[in-house]
Amino acid sequence: MRQKNQVELNLGTGARGEALSAAAQETEARAARTDIESRSALVGPSMEAIVERENLKKALAQVKRNKGAPGIDGMSVDDLPAYLKEHWPAIRAQLLDGAYKPQPVRRVEIPKASGGKRPLGIPTVLDRFIQQAVMQVLQADWDGTFSEQSFGFRPGRSAHQAVARAQAYIASGYGCVVDLDLEKFFDRVNHDILMGLVAKRVPDKRILKLIRGFLTAGVLADGLVSATEEGTPQGGPLSPLLSNLMLDVLDKELEKRDHRFVRYADDCNIYVRSQRSGERVMASLEKFLAKRLKLTVNKAKSAVAKPNGRKFLGFSFTGGREPRRRIAPQAIVRFRSRVRELTRRTRGASPAQIVTELSRYLVGWRGYFGFCETPSVLRALDQWLRRRLRAIVWKQWKRGRTRYAELRRRGVGRDLAAQSAGSPHGPWRLSNSPALTIALPNAFLGSLGLPSLAPNKAANPSNRRIRTRMYGGVGGEEP
């Protein structure tokens, strides 16, 4: 506890509760003079607010919660408090003097949900801490000026709210969507345009220099550092806020034109009444984005279409006068792919181990996609999941003698057990058989910790209903 308090005290002034060297005392004195001179000269976000003790404590706590991999220096999140305890006075002085220089980010690639890979820049833990402190001050000052139609990376706002807003527009008669996809947005952001937007809101030149430093710090890949002349590297806490600032220009233009739209980060949908008006809006916005922000619309991924033919944040909508939220087909494909990975029959893990790993994924997935209004899809996925688990157990019983014994032990009649144990059919076919639904009922799978995706009322249909539906539809597909 004492060490924690010392670190927190350090974040305030740099004092460590012990004698400071002459050099450290001079550093503190210089920083204090800069504090006094700067506070009276600036109006708006300032470096003094960024290095203020409470802001730094909040930033450090957030970086710890986010965890994340080390940057190019190899320092982990767990190493950061001890490093700040020793070096924070000098770092603070550099920030107040405008002399701090961020380090290059470490380039990694992560899989994209739609296939391919997305480049991710991992700043050092120290730079993530400083970015977080900067972001907190700027977000508090800027967020209230952003559009009501912007929902991404903003406090108190969520993807579910964005989807619900889109649904309301469709229900009110705006039955055509201009689905705008910006080509490699985070990689193509123009630094000069972005810094011009920041400069309109931030008078402190030290902050401007620091943000420019984060943008141009460079990327370490394959042992070489390359310059970054455009883009905001994904992976740092500051990048989402800067992207919102950049695209707020688009938001304000859409508001000026009195359009109904919803934006979540770089996903923007504009809702209009007809295909013709949608095509006019698309053509106009392509020109606006190219001229004003130097951004390019990805024509292959953008479209003017009916909302039920497009996806937005993993959801789509049914047709008709009262559109309902449904899970986009692409999201269901990704769900099935992930479940197949977690439930491979050749893994050799016990059903309990598989369910433990699977449940972590299912709980998070249900927390997001449970927002849909098509419970029949969730029930069908539930049935498919249980069938896969029954197939795993059947596969692990291996021999006919073992299968017969396990079926009898679990309450299956003698004739049915013998018929099933001697069947030439494979595990997937037999996972739908009456014998296995008796031997491995829903209650048994639930006792292993398998969560249900479906609403409670429909989560546990009878075995008879399961057998009936699994021969067709979602449950009938080969795994």
Image (cartoon, grey):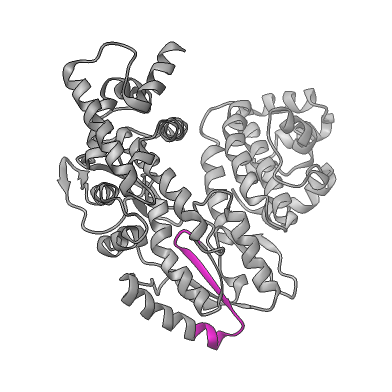
Which is more toward the observer, 474 or 159?
159
In the displayed structure image, the side of residue 225 where residue 318 appears, left or right = right
Q: Give the residue drawn at x 73%, y 32%.
A: 446
Q: Which residues are magenta?
A: 264-279
Residue farthest toward the left in the current orientation of the protein: 224
Which is more toward the observer, 36 or 52?
36
Residue farthest toward the bottom in the current orientation of the protein: 276
Asked if residue 370 shows in the view, the reply is: yes
Q: Quadrant of residue 148?
A: bottom right
Percent coordinates x, y for residue 222 in the rendering: 18, 42
In the displayed structure image, the side of residue 380 where residue 242 appears, left or right = left
Q: Give the residue drawn at x 38%, y 40%.
A: 49
Which is more toward the observer, 290 or 305?
290
Percent coordinates x, y for residue 460 in the rendering: 80, 42
Percent coordinates x, y for residue 37 in the rendering: 27, 41
In this view, 48 is above or below 163: above
Which is more toward the observer, 473 or 179?
179
Percent coordinates x, y for residue 404 in the rendering: 73, 27
Q: Quadrant of residue 229?
A: bottom left
Q: Quadrant of residue 183?
A: bottom left
Q: Give the residue drawn at x 82%, y 42%.
A: 463
Asked if residue 398 shows in the view, the reply is: no
Please state the total of marks drawn on the protein image.
Answer: 0
In this view, 277 is above or below 420: below
Magenta-drawn stretch contains 322: no
